[in-house]
Amino acid sequence: MTAVKLRELHVPGSPLVLPNAWDADSARLVVEAGFPVVATSSAAIAESLGHADGQGAPIAEMFAAAARITRVVDVPVTVDAESGYGLGAAELAGRLLEIGVVGCNLEDTVPGHGVRPIGEQAELLGSLRAAAGDGLVINARVDVFLGAENEKAVLDEAVERARAYLDAGADCVYPILVRSPEVLREFVAAVSPAAVNATLWPGGPRRAELAELGVARISLGAGLWRAARVWLAERLADLG
């Protein structure tokens, strides 16, 4: 499946819902449930492989896990590529396209080093777009809301980053874990008509509210993996 199909599914107000998978079997279940796209969760994949999130897993293992997913499904697959694993844009694009991926997330935080300067991240995104052409749907993550005590205080920076990333060639921007519906609404309006990705998380706005706020894409992140892990732990405890 081409990136065209994935790109067309990003419709503000009628969002694409992505229940993120972590292995071939969970990806099959996503497709069997009727979802038109499979997304991965880097946290879920890394932890399931015995490594920490935040680029703690070997690159080869992360790409191998994604390749197993693209092998068993016939829908578009978009991969959480974290902050790029230190690869150059051309190599990152090439490796993603080689395994059949048609989309990727790229975050602006480098583990252990904080958030990249806006210009540096925009340059990386621009290089990735140039290397991939239209073959990848690029979802540019904006991380300034993570841990922010006052989301309004970082909104201007988030919008500045989002606009720079879109100008560089990103298809969608992802202000991850915005908790305030009002702030998310302002963010969406500020970057309109661009596609915005939001997180569906316990305690946050529900799917219908996120649609009303104008987002074009909804991610569950590692939520399903965490829920499955809790379920398994409870069943194991019942056997004790």
Image (cartoon, rainbow, N blue to C red):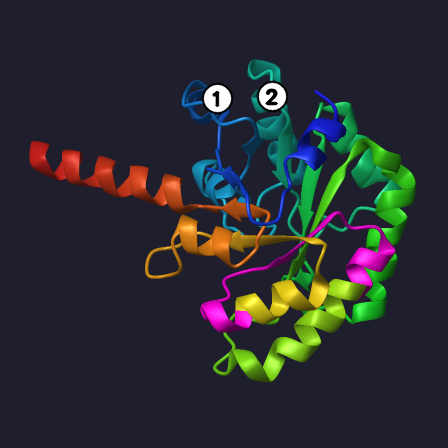
Residue 196: give x, y in percent of width and height: 63, 54
In depth, the one of 239 and 187 nearer the eye is 187
In depth, the one of 70 and 18 nearer the eye is 18
Quarter assignment of residue 74:
top right
Specify the quadrant that holds the C terminus. top left
Specify the quadrant that holds the N terminus. top right
* Residue at mark 2: 75
Residue 89 in the figure: left or right of residue 100:
right
What is the secondary structure assignment of the residue under circle 2?
loop
Answer few, some or many: residues within 10 Å of disc 2's Cα (few below 14, many 20 plus, some between 14 and 19): some
Highlighted range, magenta: 164-183
**In the rendered view, would you say 126 is above or below 131?**
below
Residue 19 in the figure: left or right of residue 130:
left
Quarter assignment of residue 67:
top right
Residue at 69% over, 68% down: 190
Residue 164: give x, y in percent of width and height: 81, 64
Residue 112: give x, y in percent of width and height: 63, 66
**In the rendered view, would you say 156 is above or below 69?**
below
What is the secondary structure assignment of the residue under circle 1?
helix
Residue 57 in the figure: left or right of residue 113:
left
Residue 93: give x, y in percent of width and height: 81, 37
Asked if residue 225 can be seen in this view, the reply is yes
Q: Tell me the kind of residue under disc 2.
A: Val
In depth, the one of 11 and 122 nearer the eye is 11
Residue at 57% over, 53% down: 215
Residue 167 among those drawn in magenta: yes
Dot 2 and dot 1 residues touching (CB under 8 Å):
yes
* Residue at mark 1: 31
Quarter assignment of residue 103:
top right
Q: Tell me which label, 2 or 1, sits earlier in the chain.
A: 1
Answer few, some or many: residues within 10 Å of disc 1's Cα (few below 14, many 20 plus, some between 14 and 19): some
Q: Tell me the kind of residue under disc 1.
A: Val
